[in-house]
Image: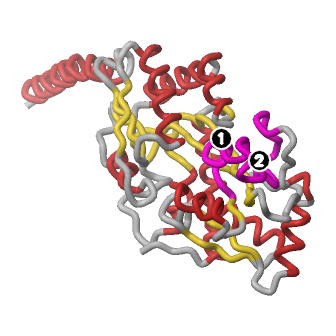
Amino acid sequence: MRLEGTLTRRLLLAFAAGLACITAPLAQADTGAWPTRPVKLVVGYAAGGATDVIARLVAAKLGEQLGQPVVVDNRAGANSNVGAEVVAKSPPDGYTLYVFTIANTINASLYDRLGYDPRKDFEPIGLIAKIPNILVVNSSSPIRSLADYQRFARESKDGITFASSGSGSSIHLSGELFKMQAKLNMLHVPYRGSAPALTDLLGGQVQSMFDNTPSALPHVQGGRLRAIAITSAKRSPLLPEVPTIAESGFPGFDMGSWFGLAAPAGTPKAVIERLNAELNKALGAPDLRRRFQEMAATPEPGTPEQMRAFAAAETLRWREVVKASGAKVE
């Protein structure tokens, strides 16, 4: 019996040693040797928008640094939920990444049901950039300051209208956030995208809009729209004469669109750390920073932990705004 027990133990030890020899190279392939093939970067919006442009700029830099192509894959639909679900259900091997945005923290409260959990199904890699929104009015409007805007909303029987690219969008909820803090009578007018909303603002069918800076900027510079205030904590170098909402009577007001890099939950820590280091290196490149500045985007290098904490705080903030606005998507 002792002989059989000794043989059994030896066989088990030999099996464990052999298994270790097999799995060790696999673990090394998952982390140390990564990447050995192209990496896919999923964007939850169509080509041409700010999220897509930022993704392609970052993908090009990461591809150069990693020695493997980083290919952008546009999976538009349901306010980025289609792309998010694709990534959440992908293998956590470092070969499928996602541009995680403010929309994902809004969607957590906006939708009754999601095919993924924005908090549990992603591994944060790091923030990429932030872009402020601008409160704009038609250039023929008598409103020339945030004080004028508030006065108009209070004195008008019907309040003031503000357009957005759709219910629950960052453009919509930045207006709702200001409405809550200023306690104004503001009527939300949703559109199917930013372009038709801007068309009606330019045509005088609506009175204002808290638009993304890259979208509104050409019209402001062309004299067709007037910028009243910017939603970020600091003024934009592209519009240095436009005051912030914070300095115009609302201390602490700070919001805008933001973009981060994430991977499916369970992605090896070594891969996350490598990607974070490469992302921060890319964000420090002069040519990338110059392109970001042209679209009013501020690079946001940092750690995965900082992105996780930021996204959690954003989810809580927008939960309150979504609840107050009554916005909901089935």
Between 39 and 155, the one lying in front of the other is 155
The image shows residue 181, relative to residue 52, as above or below, that is below
Circle 2 crowding by C-alpha within 10 Å: few under 14, some 14–19, many from 20: many
CB under 8 Å between discs 2 and 1: yes
Amino acid at the residue labelled 2: Ser
Q: Is residue 191 magenta?
A: no
* Residue 318 seen in the figure: no
Q: Quadrant where the N terminus lies?
A: top left
Could you tell me which residue is drawn at 85 percent across and 63 percent down? 143
Figure quadrant of residue 106: bottom right
State the extent of the magenta-drawn residues as a range: 210-239
The label shown at residue 130 is 1
The label shown at residue 28 is none
- Tag 2 secondary structure: loop
The label shown at residue 232 is 2
281 lies left or right of 132: left
Q: How is the image coloured?
A: secondary structure
The percent coordinates of residue 297 (x first, y second) are 66, 36
The percent coordinates of residue 256 (x first, y second) are 68, 50
The image shows residue 48, relative to residue 146, as above or below, that is above
The percent coordinates of residue 50 (x first, y second) are 54, 42
